[in-house]
Amino acid sequence: MNIIISNSSDTPIYSQIVQCIQRDIVNGVLSEGDVLPSIRTLAKELSVSVITTKKAYEILEGQGYIETHQGKGSFVSKKSVTLAREHRISAMEQSLLDAIDVSRELGLSYSELTNILDTLYKEV
Amino acid sequence: MNIIISNSSDTPIYSQIVQCIQRDIVNGVLSEGDVLPSIRTLAKELSVSVITTKKAYEILEGQGYIETHQGKGSFVSKKSVTLAREHRISAMEQSLLDAIDVSRELGLSYSELTNILDTLYKEV
Amino acid sequence: MNIIISNSSDTPIYSQIVQCIQRDIVNGVLSEGDVLPSIRTLAKELSVSVITTKKAYEILEGQGYIETHQGKGSFVSKKSVTLAREHRISAMEQSLLDAIDVSRELGLSYSELTNILDTLYKEV
Amino acid sequence: MNIIISNSSDTPIYSQIVQCIQRDIVNGVLSEGDVLPSIRTLAKELSVSVITTKKAYEILEGQGYIETHQGKGSFVSKKSVTLAREHRISAMEQSLLDAIDVSRELGLSYSELTNILDTLYKEV
DNA sequence: GTGGTCTAGACCACG
DNA sequence: GTGGTCTAGACCACT
């Protein structure tokens, strides 16, 4: 598990934590049943407030990624992998839809759009 | 010119105004030298505070889209069209790059990515 | 007499008119007793409001540069040349004082300051 | 940190605040990473509206002098010292250029100009 | 009429 | 505690 947060970013710290954990679940770095660090441990590691890590865990629990059991800790849930994958797919589709919208707004044809995608794909 | 704002949106009202005007500049609805409605007139039309419309105009001026002169009003600047177009293109490229990143994260091939793009393009 | 105004400048138009006329008096383009164009004529030439030219003339009269006689027009006053010269000298001194202030703030020595002045003088 | 504002001045209060903070950065009174007083605290101290201090901080952020993060406060940025110094130098050069322009307009020689500078330098 | 500055409040999000 | 957004007024300068 690998969480890096940036104080200078404009996305809230708790969101950054949420995204990092979701990413690790998609990547397979975190698997079903794995234990997450306690909110206090994580808060210390990241030098942030306990409130902040707590909020992140609450969001992840609300979305079904993790399950928290009193006195035992937080665990990666069964459905988390499927959830995370669906989440990333819909994010990708939304990005593509955004690009399509703008390309039409700019008067570009479909082949012009795919050419740009092609170029970008080779670059990175 | 056509500005529609939503109070329930989570993007601030002044941002919505900024985006609408930028969009109208890209679309050619607003051209170089055109006068924008006064901050007070626009505020009445949209039923928002004068300060909100003023903030939108200040941002647009800071980005070089418009020029504001005391006692005269606000005007679409010369470089606005170029600026707006560049802005939209880079936004589209960023969307595509995001989609590419996620597709790789999910282990999709390039042809799988373009198939999704193709499907989405026909749908909307 | 040569008045050029800029709508995009942030100095008010009436100030620009005042400065242009003061400058022409210093330069000798306007001499004691010369007639100035009427406020209406000047307003037409410059494509500005009559109120604006009127304000400029009022300021010039208040400072003693011109004299306005009902039905005859506005004339360059006797003391205008002396006035204008003094005005420019004090403006120059103020600029030098500003530069001195900043040079001290930056920790520059007197010789460093004069070196910069020397360089700038040769450049322009 | 030392901010003094004048209500009777014709420069807006928020500009005065901006200038004071820029000056303190040049002087080294404020250094990279230092926390600025919160906009509310500063507003109380100066007996001005929160919006006025906020506007000052927004301008400083736009110019790159400070960084503001929600819930954390405003901090002096890395590049602030360089920025501030460059800013002051170009301001000083502009003052000198203005003085040179006027001296030529008045028909003064270079030595007459430096004599005036010399006199002024000793006076203050 | 226009924008520029300022006030004295309010509610929300973040830590 | 912090800043971010917004309101509903006010007075002034410029055209």
Image (cartoon, coloured by chain):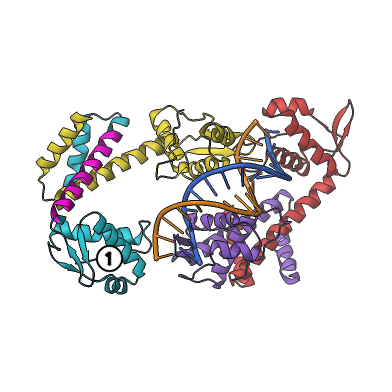
Chain colours: A cyan, B yellow, C red, D purple, E orange, F blue
Q: Which residue is mark 1?
A: A4
Observer-nearest of B81 and E7: E7
Count numbered badges in the picture.
1
Confirm whether residue D12 shows in the render: no
Relative placement, left or right, of C106 versus A96 is right
Q: Quadrant of residue C36?
A: top right
Observer-nearest of B7 and B105: B7
Residue D42 position (above or below residue A90): below
Residue sitting at x 31%, y 39%: B89
Residue D111 position (above or below residue B110): below
Residue sitting at x 40%, y 36%: B82
Residue D87 position (above or below residue A122): below
Relative placement, left or right, of A68 versus C83 is left
Residue A94 position (above or below residue C72): below
Q: Is residue B57 magenta?
A: no
- In this view, which residue lies farthest toward the front? A70
Q: Quadrant of the C terminus of chain B?
A: top left
Q: What stretch of residues is rendered in magenta?
A: A81-102
Q: Quadrant of residue C118?
A: bottom right
Q: Is residue A98 magenta?
A: yes
Residue sitting at x 27%, y 74%: A41
Confirm whether residue D102 shows in the render: yes
Residue type (three-letter) at the residue carrying disc 1: Ile
Q: Where is residue C104? Give x, y as percent.
A: 63, 70
Q: Where is residue D124? Give x, y as percent.
A: 73, 70
Q: Main secondary structure of the magenta part?
A: helix
